[in-house]
Image (cartoon, rainbow, N blue to C red):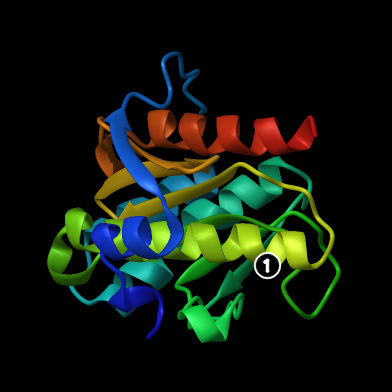
Amino acid sequence: MAYSDFSLKDLKVQFGLENRVERLFSEIEPVAISAGLKEDLELASQLPVRSEKAKSELIVMPILLELMKRNKKFFTIYSGDRLNADKTKGLSGECDFILAKDTGTFDINTPIITLVEAKKNDVEIGIPQCAAQMLGARIYNHEYGNAIDKIYGCVTTADDWVFMKLEGNTIFIDNRKYYLGQVEELMGVLQSIIDFYAKK
């Protein structure tokens, strides 16, 4: 079993995780994007960006890099790396993106955000996988002595973005989608998550 094999029911039965749908971010301050990111996204809109790989390279990664630059390399981006938290329970496998709080290490250190690229252009399909990866990130952190109990996640088609939060025994799924067409607001959500960890 791997992260992508879990359903929300599996997570409830095996780990006691409930799930709730609610608004996660009530007040978001939009963040102006740089001229460089604006140019990158405009160029991507002129290309046949259909595959997950293309969306990852031309849209998702530039947004994450912009976020990293804004925060003076507060976090590291891992793309396509494996997060092996507990193989015996199926909490292992490759992750599309992991944002880890500590920088300067070769291996993953202190994961705080997991990001899943939605299959079949449907964010709902990716929600259980993202939830399993968030649980894996929390277990991974505790194993290495990093007491981070709140983990964020996101499922995206590159155009649509749904955010999630694992806190206690509950997976919170945002009842609002954010859109690439409103990238300043999307960046505001991402920045608010980084701000939360920066205060820890």
Q: Is residue 161 left or right of residue 98?
A: left
Across the whole image, how many numbered discs are drawn on residues? 1
Query: Mark 1 — residue?
Result: 140
* Quadrant of image for the N terminus: bottom left
Q: In this view, does 10 lie above or below 74?
A: below
Q: Is residue 185 left or right of residue 190?
A: left
Residue at point 40%, 75% (across, down): 3
Which residue type carries mark 1? Answer: Tyr
Image position, residue 187 (x, y; %): 48, 36
* Quadrant of image for the C terminus: top right
Image position, residue 134 (x, y; %): 51, 57
Residue closer to the observer: 180 or 177:
177
Q: In which quarter of the image is residue 126?
A: bottom left
Residue closer to the observer: 141 or 113:
141
Residue at point 28%, 57% (across, down): 8
Q: Can residue 92 be seen in this view?
A: no
Q: Can residue 113 be seen in this view?
A: yes
Dot 1 alpha-carbon crowd within 10 angstroms: few under 14, some 14 to 19, many 20 or more: many
